[in-house]
Amino acid sequence: MTLAVGRNITLEDALADAEARYVAANPKSRTRHLEAGRVLPGGNTRSILYYAPFPVTITRGEGARLFDLDGHAYLDFLGEYTAGLYGHSDPVIRAAVEQALKDGIVLGAPNRYEAELAQLMCARFPSLDMVRFCNSGTEANLNALSAARTATGRSQIMVFEGAYHGGMLSFAHGTSPMNVPFPYVLGRYNDLERTLGLIERHKGELAAIVIEPMMGAGGCIAAEPDFLAGLRAAATRHGIILIFDEVMTSRLAPGGLQAKLGILPDMTTFGKYLGGGMSFGAFGGRAEIMGRFDPSRPDALPHSGTYNNNVLTMAAGAAGLSKVFTPEAADALSATGERLKVRLNGIGERQGVPVQTTGVGSILCMHFQSEPIHEPDDTAHTPAAARALFHLEMLARGFYVARRGFIALSLPLVESDYEAFADAFEDFLSACGPVLRG
Ligand SMILES: Cc1ncc(COP(=O)(O)O)c(C=O)c1O
């Protein structure tokens, strides 16, 4: 930040200045973005990766580092929105993928890895008797919701305002026009009284309640244990299938947040890092629900997907969970994240800037506001320009984070990386404090 503090600078002035420096520093990424726009709408094939004025193009990753087209290096504090838990070149993951490649891909048959990964997951996550694989977290939720509708013979789905369960299950601003047209009932996160009222009103028609035990995309907002326990009790009382979307949160404790909280859903959905960094999704739960997918049963539910058991994902996922992301590693990474959160919040207080870091363990989010945050609507006090300024200023300092302030830690980050991140954050706050307070 080069603007002279003391002049009457607004947040928008500071952002315009940061954008001008960003454009000047990234000419090759800009050209690539403009060229890509001829064949990809907005130069993009994954909306979350777009940000103004244009995203940097990453050409290579190694360990916890990323390198872009214009020659900048970054410490990766985004961790591919939690899918990058193992970093970019973990030797165990690489060896598993290389072995699987050597043995041939697209085999078109059960392979030697899928039952191993299923066994590892069922041993780890307490609500899983059985599991099935798919290719994304979105698919996992679609499968789980359809299974719940079939199992209950009911149609409605309770979701929460501000929730994200995939590209076709997005409730950030009401419901998205791209959503699957299920009949939704929108509960309010962490508001038990209101949500229980809705459940009572719809109890005869609700097939499932789907909820993240910590909202990730919604702003890293942890569910209060009493709220989840209340949902659990209501679901049991009315025969509604409770689904925990642990696509992000399963990494936050050895057995996911469900184990940490001691609240077990009927079904759980997974994704992200559990495929070792390859495309991945999974859904599982109680045997009487999942057993319906047994194709030898006369009443079998179909569940297809050419790449459901692709060898690269299955091999990388099994190697990662058995040899790298052990229960001890999961606990250690969560403890590191908790320490970082405390440290960042301390820096905010010391600098007298209205900022707070929310989240649990290794999944955190920055909000530039002092108002407390219990549900996604509460984050609206943070101006979009503050998030954008944080993002561009951290990129300029060599730290790759998400535009929305989201941070996901990865295993190859070391203590000196966390020190460097905290120092850069303090430097950003001391430079931009005046406009953030403004
Ligand atoms: C909680 C949650 N559920 C589901 C998804 C969708 O996963 P995918 O992007 O693999 O489809 C995401 C992705 O960010 C997520 O955060």
Image: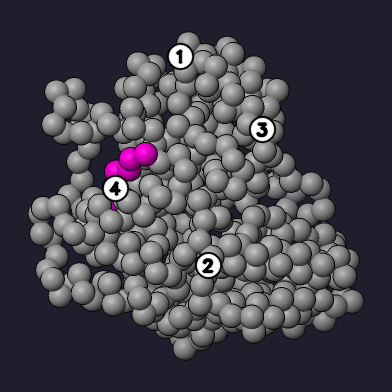
Residue at the spot of label 1: 205
Residue at the spot of label 4: 133
* CA–CA distance in space, label 1 to label 2: 42 Å
Residue at the spot of label 2: 329
Nearer the viewer's eye, disc 1 or disc 3? 3
**Magenta region includes residue 324:** no
Residue 61 sits above or below residue 190 on the image: below
Q: Where is residue 4 in the image (x, y as percent from the top left)?
A: 82, 81
* CA–CA distance in space, label 1 to label 3: 21 Å
**Which stretch did the figure color magenta?**
129-135
Nearer the viewer's eye, disc 4 or disc 2? 2
Q: Position of residue 82 (x, y in %)?
A: 49, 61
Q: Where is residue 205 in the image (x, y as percent from the top left)?
A: 45, 14
Mark 1 crowd level (few <14, some 14–19, many ≥20, 10 Å Cα): some
Residue 5 sits above or below residue 250 on the image: below
Q: What's the magenta bit mostly, secondary-structure-wise?
A: strand
Dot 1 lies on which element? Answer: loop
